Image: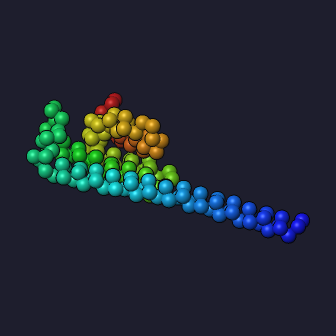
Amino acid sequence: MKLTTAVIAAGTAAALTIAAVGAARLRQDARHQTERNDAVVARNHLDWLAQISTTPDLAKLWAPEDMDVEEYMQLLKANQLICMLSLRDRLGLVRDGHLPFSASMVMSSDVCRRYWHRFGDLRVQEAEGDERAEQFTRALDQAAKNHPQARSSAA
């Protein structure tokens, strides 16, 4: 092989390596930006839930017509807890295989089970098309159904 051919081959290999590293970096940057966006949107949602769940006049504006404002505020606090767990899951902070345990712990609370009974179907609809959200919602739904009080009331 001539020296010029070897130099061109080495240059091409180096350029391809740099391009591959650059592409990997762009994918990583995009993933991190998505995570930052998720965190910012979740923070805004959690802030709104904190306000509405502690301000009766504000909760009254949003409460379903057939629900007492105090009950609605309690359910929003449960939603706040579920949203925090959801964010942790989306950011990869819930270890593999640990989601069912976390969901079970959340559903050990009566107010969380009441929230899920009332708004769980809405959460299922919101999750449609997002594999991770669907998995999260299935885990919560299963935990709600598996809770001893849920099983005893179904019997």
Direction from residue 111 to residue 34 in the image, left or right: right
> Residue at point 37% right, 56% down?
39
Direction from residue 143 to residue 60 in the image, left or right: left
47 relative to 126, above or below:
below
Give the farthest residue toward the right: 1
> Residue at point 33% right, 52% down?
41
Direction from residue 115 to residue 22 in the image, left or right: right
State the image coordinates of residue 104 (x, y, percent, origin top left): 38, 47
State the image coordinates of residue 89 (x, y, percent, origin top left): 43, 52
State the image coordinates of residue 23 (x, y, percent, origin top left): 59, 57
Q: Quadrant of residue 5?
A: bottom right
Give the farthest residue toward the bottom: 3
Viewer-side residue, 13 vs 29: 13
Image quarter in which the N terminus is found = bottom right
> Residue at point 20% right, 46% down?
74
71 relative to 22, above or below:
above
